[in-house]
């Protein structure tokens, strides 16, 4: 049986820029950073306190790069988390939205991908 998600691939144009974004602004740590082939690296980031990792991959065909919009992170306090990230320069698409089920906000990474921060 499936037990968990090991990693999620996030497309990047510049792996070093993406690593800096996720480590400096979000506090993720580098779990693995090693050569993959002549032009790419295998970069896995660990989310503090979590088991799922982000793999920052660089496509060999830049035209095939798709921006992702379907990964959601959870936070205990979405308002506070978004305020802290904004202070670090993270761009949000709008204010935190509140609904009956909880709160959420959408942000962009250094590569133009969009993600959601949501209450649990």
Image (cartoon, rainbow, N blue to C red):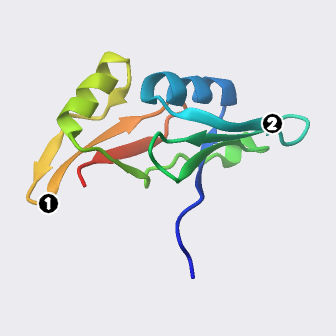
Is residue 65 left or right of 51 when viewed as pictured? right
Q: Secondary structure at mark 1?
A: loop
Quarter of the image for residue 105 reads top left
Q: Residues within 10 Å of mark 2 (few under 14, many from 20)?
A: few
Q: CA distance from mark 1 to mark 2?
A: 41 Å
**Image location of residue 6, percent across then percent down:** 59, 59
Residue drawn at x 51%, y 33% is: 28
**Image location of residue 12, percent across then percent down:** 63, 37
- Outermost residue toward the front in this view: 49
Q: Between 9 and 53, which is closer to the camera in this rendering?
A: 53
Residue drawn at x 57%, y 82% is: 1
Q: Is residue 28 visible?
A: yes
Is residue 83 left or right of 101 when viewed as pictured? right
**Mark 1 or mark 2: which comes first in sequence?**
2
Q: Is residue 110 visible?
A: no
Disc on res. 101: 1
Residue drawn at x 85%, y 34% is: 39
Q: Which residue is mark 2?
A: 34
* Disc nearest the viewer among 1 and 2: 2
Is residue 92 left or right of 24 when viewed as pictured? left
Residue drawn at x 30%, y 35% is: 93
Q: Residues within 10 Å of mark 1 (few under 14, many from 20)?
A: few
Q: Between 90 and 25, which is closer to the camera in this rendering?
A: 25
Q: Between 71 and 62, which is closer to the camera in this rendering?
A: 71
Q: Secondary structure at mark 2?
A: strand
Q: Quadrant of the C terminus?
A: bottom left
**Image location of residue 47, percent across then percent down:** 49, 42
């Amino acid at each position: 049986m499936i037990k968990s998600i090991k990693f999620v691939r996030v497309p990047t144009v510049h792996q070093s820029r993406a690593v800096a974004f996720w480590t400096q602004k979000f506090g993720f740590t580098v779990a693995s950073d090693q050569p993959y082939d002549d032009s790419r690296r295998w970069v896995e980031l660990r989310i503090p306190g979590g088991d799922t990792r982000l793999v920052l991959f660089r496509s060999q065909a830049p035209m095939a790069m798709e921006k992702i919009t379907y990964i959601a992170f959870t936070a205990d306090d979405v308002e506070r988390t978004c305020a802290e990230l904004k202070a670090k320069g993270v761009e949000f698409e709008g204010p935190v939205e509140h609904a009956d089920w909880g709160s959420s906000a959408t942000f962009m990474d250094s590569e133009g991908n969009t993600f959601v921060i949501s209450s649990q």
